[in-house]
Amino acid sequence: MTPALIWIGFGVLFTFLVLADLGLFAKQKNHVIGVKSALRRTAVWIGVALAFVPVVYYLYENHIGGLGEASGEIAATSGKQAAITYLTGWVVEYALSVDNLFVIAVIFTTMKIPAGSQHRVLFWGILGAAVMRAVLIVAGVELVQKYEWIMYVFGVLLLWASFKMLRGDADGPEDTIPAEVSEDLGGTPGPAAQSVATERSWVVRLASKVYPISDRLDGEKFTIMENGRRALTPLAVALLMIEAADLGFAVDSIPAVVAITNDSFLALTSNLFAILGLRSLYFALSAAMDAFRFLKYSLAAILAFISVKMLLHSHYKIDTTLSLGIVIGLLLIGVAASLMFKPKPKAI
């Protein structure tokens, strides 16, 4: 089997899975997904991602389509190494994607998007993110393979991202947030709201140069006719904001997956499988966003760990199995701390 057929095969598989995800929601319009249903669907998509592990093992163990073969100074990759690398990349990207969901929740709140319309925005937003990630990952891997010093640049970027995530709670008070955003968020805005306010302003300015912006929703339509002209609805603006936010998050996630592997197939598949099913995960977490308040510290620690791994790559290589254990361990600590130390109820 040729390398081209491997890529085409994965492309067909991923397209089928995306269409399957769309089909789950197409039967009922304006249907609000319940938490239990969302959890079941999230479990299915996690199962699909994990089911790809033995596929990766088989492809690399037998070097199907040239995958994992030795090239120049690069040693051959065994099936076990490839499977662990894919799993590590998937865990890291899935965890980082959860952080994206918090920003998406703020976008929906700010733009007053009804729950019944959110699934359509999420589908197209995640589909756009998948295409964007694919292009950026291939470009990132190419850069690292040609210019090794790029690893140090990525390492510094990840360290800065970790620092920004840690200092999030220290960012300005409520009066630094635009009034309408503060009101929409129930008077408890944070760094995510500030980011959304910034994105909203430049996205609206840029989009309004092409189409007028309407403040009127019309079901799940992205455009409507208003005053004799086609205009963008708040649904379309929310979609553009989600894509803009994901481009910003890609600055963190792309270096992270490239730090784990410079194998294009492993980097791309682990990232795309992490994105797949995020729509279901959003509805599963939407009712409990505040419950995982310590998760961001775990994500910051993971980014810092990967950053150090990149900066030391030419002097010391951390075993892939150990890396996977550290990443999972840090995530479990964040989840456990969130469950043990729940926020105190606010005084009325």
Image (cartoon, rainbow, N blue to C red):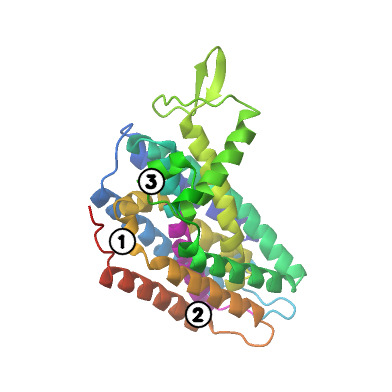
Ranked by sequence position, the earlier of labels 1 and 3 is 3
Kindly identify the residue that appears in the image at 50 percent across and 39 percent down. Answer: 239
Q: Amino acid at mark 1?
A: Ala
Label 1's element? Answer: helix
Read off the residue under disc 1. 291
Label 3's element? Answer: loop
* Structural crowding at the residue carrying mark 3, measured as other residues with C-alpha within 10 Å and reported as few (<14), some (14–19) or many (≥20): some
Query: Is 173 rendered above or below residue 216?
Result: below
Read off the residue under disc 2. 323
- The secondary structure that dominates the magenta segment is helix
Ranked by sequence position, the earlier of labels 2 and 1 is 1
Query: Is 228 rendered above or below residue 185?
Result: above
Q: Which residues are magenta?
A: 76-101
Q: Nearer the viewer, residue 201 or 280?
A: 201
- Left or right, 192 with respect to 34, comes to right
Q: Amino acid at mark 2?
A: Ser
Tell me how far mark 2 sits from mark 3, CA to CA.
38 Å
Q: Nearer the viewer, mark 2 or mark 1?
A: 1
- Left or right, 145 with respect to 113, comes to right
